[in-house]
Image (cartoon, rainbow, N blue to C red):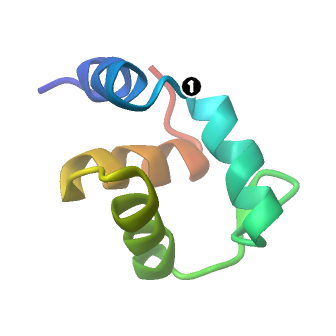
Amino acid sequence: MSFQAYIDNIRTKTSKTPEDFVRLAEEKGFLKKGVPVAKATEIVNWLKADFDLGHGHANAIYAYFKGKRV
């Protein structure tokens, strides 16, 4: 599955864009000025628990946080 397909599936499932996840992660203190300050595992576990994302989809959002773009 391509990175874009992961992002599209996440948007379909959650109605949230990657930018929405950036904002939410900053509110939780996982990001500062768009840069991760928490461990990857902590962020991925949050995405899986709060948004019911699978491991691969949560990792795609984390990759977006780290700078990967479509």
Q: Residue at x 45, y 45 (%)?
A: 61
Disc 1 designates what residue?
Answer: 17
In the rendered view, does 62 fall on the left or right side of 2? right
Q: Position of residue 63 (x, y in %)?
A: 45, 49
Three-letter code for the amino acid on which mark 1 is drawn? Thr
Q: Residue at x 37, y 67 (%)?
A: 49
The image quarter containing residue 7 is top left
Secondary structure under the numbered disc 1 in the rendered image: loop
Where, quadrant-wise, is the C terminus in this rendering? top left
In the rendered view, does 28 fall on the left or right side of 44? right
Q: Residue at x 53, y 82 (%)?
A: 39
Q: Position of residue 20 (x, y in %)?
A: 67, 34
Q: Nearer the viewer, residue 27 or 30?
A: 27
Q: Position of residue 41 (x, y in %)?
A: 40, 79
Q: Nearer the viewer, residue 58 or 3?
A: 58
Count numbered badges in the picture.
1
- Location of residue 50 with respect to 46 vertically, above or below: above
- Location of residue 8 with respect to 20 vertically, above or below: above
- Location of residue 30 with respect to 19 vertically, above or below: below
Q: Position of residue 26 (x, y in %)?
A: 79, 58
Q: Residue at x 28, y 23 (%)?
A: 9
In the rendered view, does 69 fall on the left or right side of 21? left
- Taking the view exactly as shown, the residue that stands out farthest to the right is 33
How busy is the neighbourhood of tag 1: few (under 14 within 10 Å), some, or many (20 plus)?
Answer: some
